[in-house]
Amino acid sequence: MVSAPIAAVERRYDAGGLWAAIVVTLGWHVASALPTALLGWSSYRPAGLGFVVWSVVLVLGIAASVVLLRGGGRRPTLGVLVTPVLLASVWVVAVATPSGQCLDPYSWAFASVGWFALVAFWRRRPWELAAFFGLITVVGFGTILYAGHLDRVTLARFIMTSYGVSILELTIFAGSRALTALARRMAVAQEAQARLANRRLAAEATHESRRKRFDAVQQTAAELLRGLAGNELDLHDPETQQRMRVAVSRLRRLIIERDDVPDPLQHELRACADVAGQRGVEVDLQVAITSTPPMPVAARRALTEPVIHVLAATKTHARITLVCDTTDVRVAVVADAPATALDGGGWAAECSYDDEGGLLWAQTRWNALSLSQS
């Protein structure tokens, strides 16, 4: 299937060639055929018939041009309608001249109607235009036989004239098709180059994203690993356990936050719940029916960071609730965790919490309309 840019290039070149054909056709009809029809006014039988046919052909050409410029002409209908009129014009004008055949100086139609056929068959197959010129040749030869002027000199003139009245139109037709095909191939090549460039940029962006995630993972784990390696941290210390649980959840979040999923925030909250579940904590995740609005990675990190701290300090069970609309997102967590889990503050998102009856409630909020929170 041809892409829209390539189709646009084809249409532009096709329209340019068509306009050139129309201008040449009308110019020839006015500059060459009209003076002949007017100068031979009294020579036609009946008088003025050449100009009447000239006018009919002009109207037909204008109508065909309008159809083509509006995107038509791809079906054979236009050619089927135009061909009989043009062929009849060649016969009528030739027979009406003093010599009664197509080689008469006043037989302008034999040399002119081919241009109108070029326009009418512009979007058809080449053999159809060639067949039209074959029919013109047959009609022209018929006028010579009808007038009884067939001899060697007339036959030679007829062959040369038939060649002359068709070769230019066929050359323009073939040249325009070749130019349009060349433009199409160039557009295809440019589109392929653009796709390769986009893939290269995407690969570089993916590599940079992975490098940043690796740096973040390394930074998150380095301090704890150094402390454990140097016996500076006690694994039995609740504060150390809390820090390690938070670090593990952050690592899991960093690993999955670039996953291609319909709802990244829900995906990351499930990952946080899974980390807590691996140490025996029962986590009930209640997500919104509608998908969360698009938000940057930094906003999702800000929303999930307090949740990570609460789940890291949770003893047995927790419930996470996600509520959102088109611009506002709220994540709430209730758990049997101490209020000290959120000590330190400094959250990037709006965060509020309360401790009552051994349960800790916390809520983070992000609003797309607030620049300070986005």
Image (cartoon, helix red, strand yellow):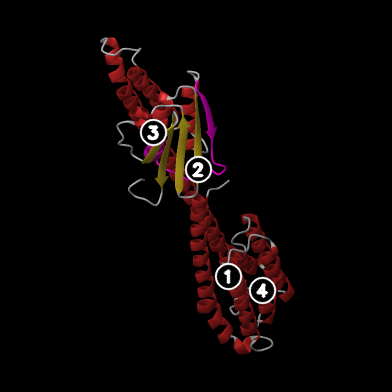
Q: Residue at x 53, y 55 (%)?
A: 177
Task: Name the residue beneath numbered marker 1.
Answer: 65
Q: Nearer the viewer, mark 3 or mark 1?
A: 3
Residue 287 on the magenta span = yes
Instruction: State the CA–CA distance, disc 2 to disc 4.
Output: 80 Å
- Quadrant in which the C terminus is drawn: top left
Q: Earlier in the sequence, mark 3 or mark 1?
A: 1
User: Circle 3 sits in a helix, a strand or a loop, which is it?
Assistant: helix
Query: Answer yes or no: do the residues labelled 1 and 2 have beta carbons within 8 Å?
Result: no
Task: Name the residue beneath numbered marker 4.
Answer: 90
User: Circle 1 sits in a helix, a strand or a loop, which is it?
Assistant: helix
Picture quadrant of residue 215: top left
Q: Residue at x 57, y 42 (%)?
A: 289
Q: Earlier in the sequence, mark 4 or mark 3?
A: 4
User: Circle 4 sits in a helix, a strand or a loop, which is it?
Assistant: helix
Q: 10 Å neighbourhood of mark 4: few (<14), some, or many (≥20)?
A: many
Query: Answer yes or no: do the residues labelled 2 and 4 have beta carbons within 8 Å?
Result: no
Task: Name the residue beneath numbered marker 3.
Answer: 306
Which residue of the protein is positioned furthest toward the right in this rendering?
146
> Left or right of 298: which side holds 12?
right
- Disc 2 residue type (three-letter): Val
- Viewer can see residue 158: yes
Query: Answer yes or no: do the residues labelled 4 and 3 have beta carbons within 8 Å?
Result: no
- Disc 3 residue type (three-letter): Pro
User: In the rendering, at what x and y percent does residue 39 appear?
Assistant: 56, 86
